[in-house]
Image: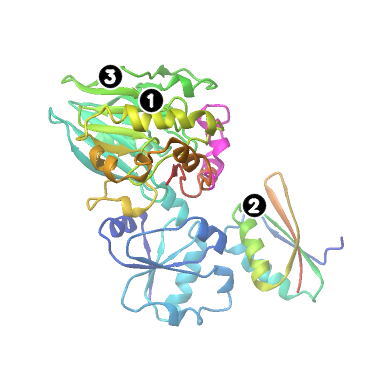
Amino acid sequence: MTYQPMTAKEVTKKIFNKEPLFILDVRNTSDFEDWKVEGANFTHLNIPYFDLLDGVEEVLPKLPTDQDILVVCAKEGSSVMVADMLSEAERDVSYLQGGMKAWSEHLEPVRVGDLKDGGEIYQFVRIGKGCLSYMVISDGEAAVIDATRMTDVFLHFAKEKQATIKHVFDTHLHADHISGGRIIAKETGASYWLPPKDAAEVTFDYNKLEGGREVMIGSTAISIEALYSPGHTIGSTSFVVDNTYLLSGDILFIDSIGRPDLAGLADDWVGDLRETLYKRYRALSDELLVLPAHFMTVSELNEDGTVSEKLGKLFAENHGLNIKDEAVFRSVVSENLPPQPNAYQQIREVNMGKIIPDEEEQREMEIGPNRCAVR
Amino acid sequence: MKVDKFLDAKSLACPMPIVRAKKAIQELEEGQILEVHTTDKGSKNDFAAWTKSTGHELIEVTEENDVIQFLIKKH
């Protein structure tokens, strides 16, 4: 038997299509429990590679014969070794090419919908980490929102669409992932926008993204309307694109809401978060399609792989939008919070331009899920 | 502390540091000490989990200039 690589893109397709996949994860158990490849119909078995050095006999009976088997490790090396041993034992398996490192970096562009003048909006699903970025394209011009550090993906995509990136926005100063916004702006000559209240300590020049401001993309007036919506951070800003799409940043997710503590001021921002979710957002049209900056579990993915939902439906169904009592709300968003994202303080410093780690260090900082939400 | 065997696993990628360490420790007697140096960041968690799984004792982990140093007592 042979073994072959399976790319992050192929695994993503299986997630979107809700296909079954059996994952033999050979990382150590704490890394596996912290973060793994998840799909609606994926099953997992975690046996660290160092427990298999003397042979894979004990695993063989635990592997199904009626579905694809994918061996996963951190950077590919151990999964290749185990896949090789399994193939020697006459089992047909694949390994995840590039391991969890590649998984963390894979971006899948998915078309969300049209703009009124014929333009389009795309969501870039960072499937392994749950980050969502956006590109608005209209009449040869593009805007990028909440770009991740895999800047080539955005640059190539715009080129393929024959669009020039004119504006790059970050809805807030991110704490879970390193922004690619500044680099994209530098490479393309685009303007880089950041909310000034999140940018007090940044070491670079930027355009001040403030509520009420409109930016046009293309000659046909696609408006990107900034809506000041503090709570996750003090500067957090949402966008209404083309009067149709609400890019909610880390304020409102599909099945959860933003957490107010990652910049260290949970108590101060609980009131802002409530004001934004229960008043500012309430004043918007129920028909807006909410496009958040994260998802937490693959159950939030729609059939086409997008993560989106009508604002009206979220008001009806999202638990975080339906806590009537303010004191209860306060305790939900400030007590029993999930663990903070890996290296979140350092990531904030990178995004402020205070430290410039090399690529490998940036990868290490971003290991793990995003953890920007509370439920 | 007296080190009985030294293994240089610097610049080796996973799974090699553990594969080599396993081999090296097989050549030691119970109670003897193996010192391993690695540069693969993932080896920190892996050595902790591997020693736990095999019953060897991870006596000390130190980091110096991106080199991770392990002292392991054979069980």
- In the displayed structure, A246 sits above or below A209; it is below
Q: What kind of residue is marked 2?
A: Thr
* Residue hosting label 1: A185
Q: Is residue A324 left or right of residue A369?
A: left
Which stretch did the figure color magenta? A339-362
* Residue hosting label 2: B39
Residue A286, given in percent of the width and then of the height, sits at 22, 35
Query: Which quarter of the rendered picture does the N terminus of chain A lie within?
Result: bottom left
Which label was assigned to residue A215? 3
Verify whether residue A361 appears in magenta. Answer: yes
Front-lying residue, A321 or A173 = A321
Q: Is residue A117 left or right of residue A142?
A: left
Front-lying residue, A372 or A306 = A372
Kindly identify the residue that appears in the image at 26 percent across and 46 percent down: A306
Badge 2 sits on which subunit? Answer: B
Q: What kind of residue is marked 3?
A: Val
- Which tag is nearer the camera, tag 3 or tag 2? 3
Asked if disc 2 and disc 1 are in contact, CB closer than 8 Å, the reply is no
Q: What kind of residue is marked 1?
A: Ala
Residue A290: which quarter of the image?
top left
Q: Is residue B11 left or right of residue A83?
A: right
Residue A239, given in percent of the width and then of the height, sits at 30, 27
Front-lying residue, A163 or A317 = A317
Compute the Cα span from label 3 to label 2: 47 Å
- Which tag is nearer the camera, tag 2 or tag 1? 1
* Residue at the outermost right position: B1
Task: Judge if badges 2 and 1 mark residues of a common chain.
Answer: no
